[in-house]
Image: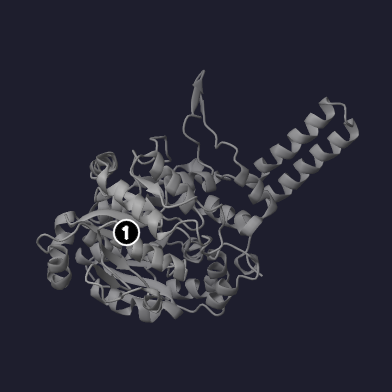
């Protein structure tokens, strides 16, 4: 084999928002002549077989045991990625040992691949289709505005947040999730699918690379859509037709029947057409599945469709990877978040002026669920917000500005060039020595809140003994949590 052509393993959980950016990156590397293997869960093999082959890559399946059923039942109420870690840890190690790649590129929640790469001594790149702020707070990198210099001493810190208490208490497995993040992220090259502008510019470790959306250039996307979806292109470009809204609510949360009807009737009342990515079994809830104003399919080439001039706005669930695609296309949004970081992302987008929430944002939860209750939005309220966002130029102007800012990022091709260099030269020269000593953001800092309660009690003369006991207990609990080591077999029940 040509020494300049390398073997690269791309490892991902099977969630679309995680796997597609990685597959786009793998396809770009395969076009450069490298041998690319896409590693995904065995239960998802049929969903990815054709896509992986079309990208010029080889498919490799991980044995997952009970991972899928445990995620669905979620007996521990945990972040689902912990079940994947528990049940794929040995399989990931076996697969990567057999493949013996020059480089592992892992999705940001595929901890089993990160653990295996470390144990096998394989250089690691992590791709993160999430905001840098999320990585920063889980890995413990300094928050913006905290870096200071005095007398030649430079320091920064990660600000205290309530999530630190959740880590301390192990809520939904956040302690284990944070531990693995803090362990691997400072010691790997991390591709962050974001850009400065939608997030505040801030100091980052040398291994953090802001890539924007991992998609091909706009011209390539348009050409591919015209070649592969000529009928859809003709529908989009129909002369004199109504403007189009693109609708996608993600691959994880299940829409309620009332939501399907509210979206459908809202689009009709707003005087729009819709291209809608909707699961097949939900089509039965459509008032009229044959309506000529709707192009509905279980899967759509989102990034390419967003480039079309007929698409004027987007209804989106605030998954970060797709959000980057929408912003790069310069389209305003109506936001329908569900769980995890989606509500926070929704608020970020509203603050950026690129869209509005479809209703009151759900409370934070890491359970894969649809928390919306009937009546929180209706056909009339959907129509109203669609018309407002489509007609008020301030939303489009803000979205187009974000598109210009994201246009300076690497994209799939630029990120592929960087990953290629990591495959050729390794990553050790990019990782600062102090990163290997990083403890990251750990639950010990959550004890600060408990200590303050104790101090306050003492100052108020409620009980000095009680104050001391509470403060000491908090410190001991924090120290114990900080010193804890996690093992894949024990991260989930």
- The single residue placed furthest to the left in the displayed view is 239
Q: Is residue 470 left or right of residue 132?
A: right
Q: How is the image coloured?
A: one colour
Q: Residue at x 41, y 73 (%)?
A: 40
Q: Which residue is mark 1?
A: 423
Rendered location of residue 365, percent (x, y): 57, 56
Q: Is residue 421 visible?
A: no
The image quarter in which residue 260 lies: bottom left
Rendered location of residue 68, percent (x, y): 52, 76
Image quarter in which the C terminus is found: bottom right
Q: Classify 174 as above or below 392.
A: below
Rendered location of residue 285, percent (x, y): 40, 75
Q: Is residue 33 left or right of residue 248?
A: left
Q: Is residue 161 visible?
A: yes
The image quarter in which residue 486 lies: bottom right
- The single residue placed furthest to the top in the displayed view is 151
- In the foreground, 441 or 391: 391
Rendered location of residue 55, percent (x, y): 25, 71
Q: Classify 121 as above or below 148.
A: below
Q: How many marks?
A: 1
Provide the secondary structure element on which disc 1 rests.
helix
């Amino acid at each position: 084999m040509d020494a300049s052509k390398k073997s690269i393993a791309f490892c991902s959980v099977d969630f679309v928002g995680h796997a597609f950016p990685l597959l786009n990156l793998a396809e770009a590397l395969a076009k450069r002549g490298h041998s690319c293997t896409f590693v995904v869960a065995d239960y998802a093999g049929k969903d990815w077989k054709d896509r992986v082959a079309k990208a010029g890559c080889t498919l490799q399946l991980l044995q997952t045991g009970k991972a899928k059923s445990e995620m669905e039942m979620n007996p521990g109420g945990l972040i689902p990625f912990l079940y994947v870690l528990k049940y794929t840890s040995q399989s990931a190690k076996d697969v990567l040992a057999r493949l013996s790649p020059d480089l592992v590129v892992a999705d940001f929640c595929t901890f089993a691949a990160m653990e295996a790469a470390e144990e096998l001594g394989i250089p690691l790149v992590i791709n993160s289709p999430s905001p840098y702020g999320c990585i920063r707070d889980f890995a413990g990198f300094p928050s913006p505005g905290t870096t200071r210099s005095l007398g030649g001493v430079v320091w920064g810190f990660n600000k205290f947040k309530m999530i630190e208490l959740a880590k301390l208490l192990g809520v939904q497995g956040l302690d284990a999730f944070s531990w693995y993040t803090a362990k691997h992220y400072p010691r790997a090259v991390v591709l962050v699918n974001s850009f400065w502008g939608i997030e505040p510019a801030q100091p980052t470790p040398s291994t953090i690379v802001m890539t924007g959306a991992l998609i091909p250039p706009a011209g390539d996307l348009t050409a591919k859509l015209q070649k592969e979806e000529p009928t859809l292109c003709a529908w989009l470009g129909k002369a004199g037709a109504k403007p189009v809204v693109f609708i996608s609510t993600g691959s994880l949360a299940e829409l309620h029947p009332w939501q399907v009807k509210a979206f459908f009737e809202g689009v009709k009342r707003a005087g729009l057409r819709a291209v809608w990515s909707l699961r097949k079994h939900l089509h039965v809830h459509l008032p009229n599945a044959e309506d000529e104003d709707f192009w509905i399919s279980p899967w759509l080439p989102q990034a390419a469709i967003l480039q079309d001039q007929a698409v004027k706005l987007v209804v989106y669930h605030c998954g970060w990877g797709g959000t980057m695609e929408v912003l790069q296309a310069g389209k305003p949004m109506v936001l329908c978040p569900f769980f995890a970081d989606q509500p926070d992302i929704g608020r970020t987008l509203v603050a950026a002026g690129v869209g509005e929430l479809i209703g009151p944002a759900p409370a934070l939860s890491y359970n894969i669920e649809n928390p919306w209750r009937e009546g929180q939005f209706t056909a009339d309220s959907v129509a109203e917000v669609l018309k407002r966002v489509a007609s008020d130029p301030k939303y489009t102007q803000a979205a187009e500005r974000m598109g210009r800012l994201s246009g300076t990022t690497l994209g799939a091709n630029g990120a592929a060039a960087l990953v290629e260099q990591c495959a050729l030269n390794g990553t050790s020269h990019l990782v600062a020595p102090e990163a290997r000593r990083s403890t990251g953001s750990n639950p010990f800092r959550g004890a600060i809140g408990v200590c303050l309660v104790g101090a306050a009690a003492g100052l108020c003369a409620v009980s000095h003994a009680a104050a001391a006991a509470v403060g000491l207990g908090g410190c001991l609990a924090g120290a114990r949590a900080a010193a804890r080591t996690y093992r894949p077999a024990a991260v989930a029940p």
